[in-house]
Image: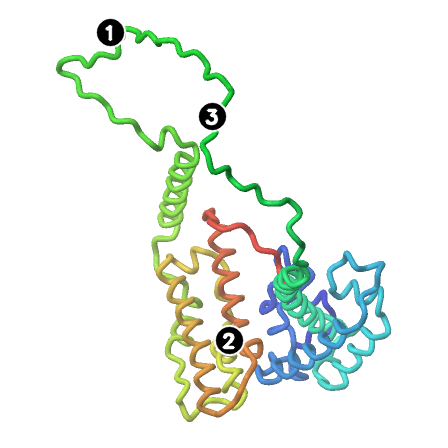
Amino acid sequence: EVLWKLEDCKTDPLVDMKPPNETRPSMIVALRCANGTVCPGAVYNRIRRTADLCARQLFDLPTNPLGAHLPKGRSYFQRFHALDYEAAIVHLENSHKILRLCAGHWKADHMLGLALGSERKKESKRAATAPLAARLDSIPEFPELVPAVNAPSHQQTSTIPNPPTTPVKKSAPRASDKPQAGKRTREPNPAAASPSVARSSKRGRNDATSINKLTAKAPGPPSEQVTALLERVQHADPESPEINEDNMGESWGHDQFAGGGLTILSSLTSWQGIGDVTTAFKLIAAAIKTCKEARLMCQAMGKSVPAASFISDSYLEILLEHVRDCWLDAGGVSTSPPESSWT
C-alpha cells in the first residue's frame, strides 16, 4: 500500500524502523507507486540523482556564521536557508510525481536528507586532506635564527669531576634462588607480564565462548525465507533474456532483494533464522556478486554510471546491517567500534 504518513512506516512489514533509525525509514522500500507496489530501482536511482544535485546546490550556499559549528543536514538548512531548502523540496516533487504520494512532503524531505548526508561525507573527506596541503604550502622559509656552532678542532677535557665509585658488594645467593635437584625451572610467561596481552587473550576466550553459545542456539538450517532469498540472489542470471528493464544496469539487484514481498527486512529477522555463520557469509558473497554483475552490465551497455547510483550497493549495506543486528541481538560480540548511523 501507499505510505501516506511517516507513521505508516512503523506498521509496514517491508519498512524496518528499529533503533537507532526509528525516525529514518529505508526509502528504498518506503517509496511506493500509486498501486502500492515498491517503486522500481531505475525510478529510485533517478530520484536519488536529482536529490544529489539539490544537495550539491545547497552545500554551495555560503555558510551561516551562527551555524558554522553545526553539521550541514536538514536541520541546518531548514534553519539558516529555509527558502532554498523549500525550493529544493518543490523541485524534487515536481521532477518525480511519486514523491507527492504522501502528506507533509516527508518523502521528498527524507530523500533530500539522504543526499545531504552523502554530500556531508564527501565534504569531510575533502576537508581532511585539503587543510594539510594548505598548511604545508603556507609555511615560509625562515632564515636560520641560531648560528651553527662549529666544533673545536682540539679535544676538550671536561672540568666536571667524575663521581667517586664505590665497590658494590655482591650478596650471597639465597637458598630459594638456587636450582634444586629434580625440579625444572619455569620459563617466564610474557603474557603474564603484559596486561594488554592478557586482555587480548581474555577477549579471545569471550569471543569463542559467545560463538559457541550462538552455535548451540541455532544449530539447525536457515529459515525458509532466508533460503529462498539466498537462492534467488545466487541464481539470478544477468544474461537472461527475461530480465525486466527496471532490473538492468545500475538497477540490477532490485528484483532479487525486493521482489514478490521477499526482502532483506522480512527475511533476516533473527540469528536463528539465518542459521549459522556459513549462511551469513553466503548471503554477503551473493550480494557482492550482484554488485559486480551490475557494473559488468553497465560496462557491456557502454554506460558510465557513478558509483553512488548502483542500487545493489544499497542492498549490500542493508544486508550487512541486518546480519550484524541479528548477530548482536543473539548475544554476539562486536569486534569493531559502533559506527554512526547514516542520515
| Res. 157 mark | 3
Where residue 250 appears, as percent x and y from the top left, is 52, 83
Q: Secondary structure at mark 1?
A: loop
- Please report contact status of discs 3 and 1: CB closer than 8 Å, yes or no: no
Is disc 3 surrounded by few (<14), some (14 to 19) or many (20+) residues within 10 Å?
few
Q: In the picture, residue 40 is in which quadrant?
A: bottom right
Q: Residue at x 51, y 61 (%)?
A: 322
Residue type beneath disc 3: Thr
Is disc 1 surrounded by few (<14), some (14 to 19) or many (20+) residues within 10 Å?
few
Where residue 229 appears, as percent x and y from the top left, is 43, 71
Q: Secondary structure at mark 3?
A: loop
Q: In the picture, residue 73 is in which quadrant?
A: bottom right
Horizontal side, residue 97 vs residue 82: left or right: left
Where residue 151 appears, as percent x and y from the top left, is 51, 39
Residue type beneath disc 1: Ala
Task: Answer above or below: position of 165 versus 302.
Answer: above
Q: CA distance from mark 3 to mark 1?
A: 48 Å
Is disc 2 surrounded by few (<14), some (14 to 19) or many (20+) residues within 10 Å?
many
Sequence order check, earlier mark of 2 and 1: 1
Residue mark closest to the camera, 2 vs 1: 1
Quarter of the image for the C terminus: give it.
Answer: bottom right
Quarter of the image for the N terminus: give it.
Answer: bottom right
Where residue 68 appears, as percent x and y from the top left, is 79, 59
| Res. 312 mark | 2
| Res. 175 mark | 1
- In this view of the protein, can residue 10 be seen by the observer? no
- The color scheme shown is rainbow
Residue type beneath disc 2: Ser
